[in-house]
Amino acid sequence: MLALLPRAEPEIGPNEIRLQDAKALDVIWVDARSAEDFSVEHAPEAIFFDQADPGSSMAGILELWLESPRVIIVYCADAGCGTSKKIAEELRANLPDAEIYSLKGGWDAWSR
């Protein structure tokens, strides 16, 4: 008889956060998916990060954080998408005092 072992949770990478941990925080959500995906559905109060105009998107996030400093979490489509990590890195360079993560599993994790 085969014994079923408990499934291990996927490793969390540096500067990543799991959805259940993120939902316990006061967060600025940043959606790094396409404009089309964002218009269909997104996290409540998420800010769209327009990759065609990153300067304007970055400025908007910086302004929002300066008005009300909170944890910033960036998400893209799924675990294989590196866009959220790249944008989170850029945000950390511009806001060294902010707590900034990419969401483990991306939008796929959110929508499950």
Image: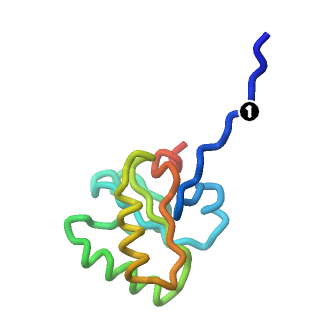
Tell whether 81 sits left or right of 104: left
Nearest to the observer: residue 84 or residue 41: 84
Crowding at dot 1, Cα within 10 Å, few <14 / some 14-19 / many 20+, comes out as few
Tell whether 6 sits left or right of 22: right
Compared with 87, 55 (above or below) is below
- Total numbered labels placed on residues in the image: 1
Residue plotted at (25% across, 72% down)? 54
Nearest to the observer: residue 12 or residue 33: 12
Residue plotted at (41% across, 53% down)? 41
Residue 74 position, x and y percent, is 44, 64
Residue 90 position, x and y percent, is 36, 73
Residue 19 position, x and y percent, is 59, 55
SS at badge 1: loop
Residue plotted at (39% across, 75% down)? 91
Amino acid found under the numbered disc labelled 1: Pro
Image quarter (top left, top right, bottom left or bottom right) of the C terminus: top right
Image quarter (top left, top right, bottom left or bottom right) of the N terminus: top right
Residue 72 position, x and y percent, is 50, 72
Q: For the view shown, which residue lies furthest in the top direction?
A: 1
Compared with 17, 77 (above or below) is above
Compared with 88, 12 (above or below) is above
Tell whether 17 sits left or right of 45: right
Residue plotted at (64% across, 55% down)? 20
Question: Which residue is labeled 1 in the image?
Answer: 6
Q: For the view shown, which residue lies furthest in the bottom direction?
A: 67
Tell whether 27 sits left or right of 94: right
Compared with 62, 24 (above or below) is above
Q: How is the image coloured?
A: rainbow
